């Protein structure tokens, strides 16, 4: 090899190392870049973001083209380095070329560009996307052939990697991102709970958040109008269901504004008002309706109130728009709400809980993870796990907690003491730090 050819070969090696670093960094940046951020940049009119988004959408083709380009330049650089070192050092040049090229490729073609790319993947991806687009176009036919060969080989061993293979749903991916951001400190607990509540709407049913029939405030339409007006004015609620003859025969929903207009029109004479005439028709929804569907239905109907029925048409309770919104933002209390202490942290790290407290509210307040698949309230969870209606002072241990029944009224558990087990006292650390917790009734 002549001296000129030797210098040209050395220069070519460094050019190839640069290309190898470009392919490695591009692969890292385009696979690590946030699709949401790229999409947002594309909406602002950044044409490079549009290129990056299209490249990321065909990720398998993109990675195949970058790997093909990376392997081509690495193999060519190693071959040239072997030729150069053989010329300079004879037979020992093969070993020297292997050592030198391994170090150069590792540092300058792998670690350095990938570290640079991962430090700001979106910015790096936007910078390289115009060039990568040409590489993908050039290597596209070869990559397609490689993909076909790989799929056939994998199919022979029973592995199906079709283009429509499902890995994670969008909800699961978002939920994982939210939990990860909370663990890493990017999201506070309240922000995580609100985002998690929004994602849970599609998985929850109205029966999970409804006000149970035993806790409903309803009016008997057969009673005198004056008595009904007094009861409506004494109630903290603006919408009240009306029933007639039988307590499960609901005939309408009385709105406080409609009552106020009727009172004004009657000159304040409540006895002359026909409550049923000013009531709105009752809206009945199945208890299996998802919260997402019910929220959309509330928005379509421009309504805030519905009665929940089971598969036999029996009224189980009621659900309001506020009940659904509270699953996202937490408890909403106004100046007319009657608040009851539902959670009372104790000095020993335990928590005294009313049996009617929803499990989801308890999990949010104490940052616990008690299951809410089989029961809505904490009393329902104890009954489900115990497979019986416990007596007072009975103690149960499950899901990493000790439950003590403090009070029982007929067949209902009305008060419990819950003690987290294990070295970390979750109740003490969470509830004590945030002060006393309250749950609105």
Image (tube, rainbow, N blue to C red):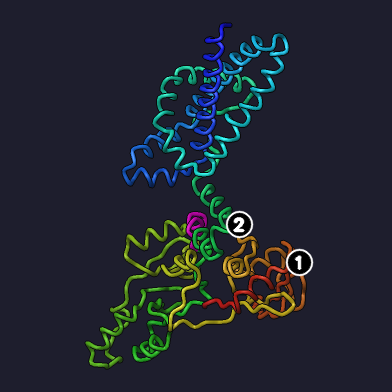
Q: According to the image, label 1 marks what residue?
A: 421
Residue sitting at the far top: 1
Residue at 47% from the left image edge and 67% from the top image edge: 329
Residue 428 x/y as whole percent: 69, 73
Report whether 198 appears left or right of 130. right
Q: Which residues are magenta?
A: 198-206
Q: Tell me the residue at 62%/60% (across/down).
A: 374
**Which residue occupies the extreme front position in the image?**
3
17 or 429, which is in the foreground? 17
Mark 2 neighbour class, 10 Å CA radius: few under 14, some 14 to 19, many 20 or more: few
Query: Which residue is identified by label 2?
Result: 183
Q: Nearer the viewer, residue 162 or 427?
A: 427
Q: Is residue 15 magenta?
A: no
Magenta run includes residue 201: yes
**Quadrant of residue 107 in the image?**
top right
Q: Is residue 242 visible?
A: no
User: Count the marks: how many?
Assistant: 2
Please state the horizontal and vertical placement of residue 2, each as a whole percent of the image.
56, 6
Mark before the other along the chain sequence, 1 or 2 = 2
Q: Alpha carbon of mark 1 to alpha carbon of mark 2: how far?
A: 22 Å
**Residue nearest the viewer, comparing 179 with 12:** 12
**In the image, which disc is placed on residue 243?**
none
């Amino acid at each position: 090899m002549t001296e000129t050819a030797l210098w040209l070969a050395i220069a070519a090696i460094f050019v190839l190392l640069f290309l190898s670093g470009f392919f490695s960094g591009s692969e890292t940046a385009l696979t690590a870049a946030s699709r949401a951020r790229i999409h947002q940049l594309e909406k602002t009119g950044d044409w490079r973001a549009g290129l990056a988004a299209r490249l990321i959408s065909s990720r398998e083709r993109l990675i195949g083209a970058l790997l093909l380009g990376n392997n081509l330049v690495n193999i060519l650089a190693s071959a040239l380095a072997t030729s150069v070192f053989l010329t300079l050092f004879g037979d020992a040049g093969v070993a020297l070329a292997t050592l030198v090229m391994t170090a150069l490729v590792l540092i300058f073609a792998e670690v350095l560009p990938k570290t640079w790319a991962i430090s700001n993947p979106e910015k790096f991806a936007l910078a390289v996307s115009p060039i990568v687009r040409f590489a993908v176009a050039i290597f596209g036919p070869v990559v397609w052939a490689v993909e076909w060969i790989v799929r056939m080989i994998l199919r022979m061993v029973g592995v199906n990697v079709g283009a429509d293979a499902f890995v994670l749903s969008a909800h699961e991916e978002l939920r994982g991102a939210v939990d990860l951001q909370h663990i890493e400190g990017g999201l506070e607990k309240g922000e995580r709970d609100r985002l998690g509540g929004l994602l849970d709407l599609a998985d929850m049913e109205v029966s999970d958040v409804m006000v149970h029939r035993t806790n409903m405030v309803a009016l008997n339409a057969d009673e005198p109008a004056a008595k009904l007006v007094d009861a409506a004015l004494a109630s903290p609620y603006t919408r009240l269901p009306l029933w007639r003859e039988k307590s499960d025969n609901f005939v309408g929903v009385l709105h406080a504004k409609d009552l106020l207009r009727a009172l004004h029109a009657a000159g304040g004479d409540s006895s002359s008002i026909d409550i049923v005439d000013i009531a709105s028709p009752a809206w009945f929804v199945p208890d299996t309706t998802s919260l997402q569907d019910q929220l959309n239905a509330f928005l379509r109907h421009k309504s805030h109130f519905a009665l929940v029925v089971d598969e036999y048409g029996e009224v189980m309770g009621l659900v309001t728009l506020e009940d659904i919104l509270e699953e996202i933002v937490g408890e909403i209390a106004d100046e007319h709400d009657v608040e009851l202490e539902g959670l009372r942290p104790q000095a020993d790290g335990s928590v005294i809980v009313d049996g009617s407290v929803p499990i989801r509210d308890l999990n949010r307040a104490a940052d616990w993870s008690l299951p809410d698949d089989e029961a809505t309230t904490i009393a329902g969870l104890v009954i489900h796990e115990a497979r019986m209606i416990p007596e007072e002072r009975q103690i149960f241990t499950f899901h990493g907690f000790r439950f003590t029944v403090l009070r029982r009224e007929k067949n209902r558990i009305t008060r419990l003491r819950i003690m987290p087990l294990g070295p970390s006292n979750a109740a003490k650390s969470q509830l004590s730090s945030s002060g006393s917790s309250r749950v609105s009734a």
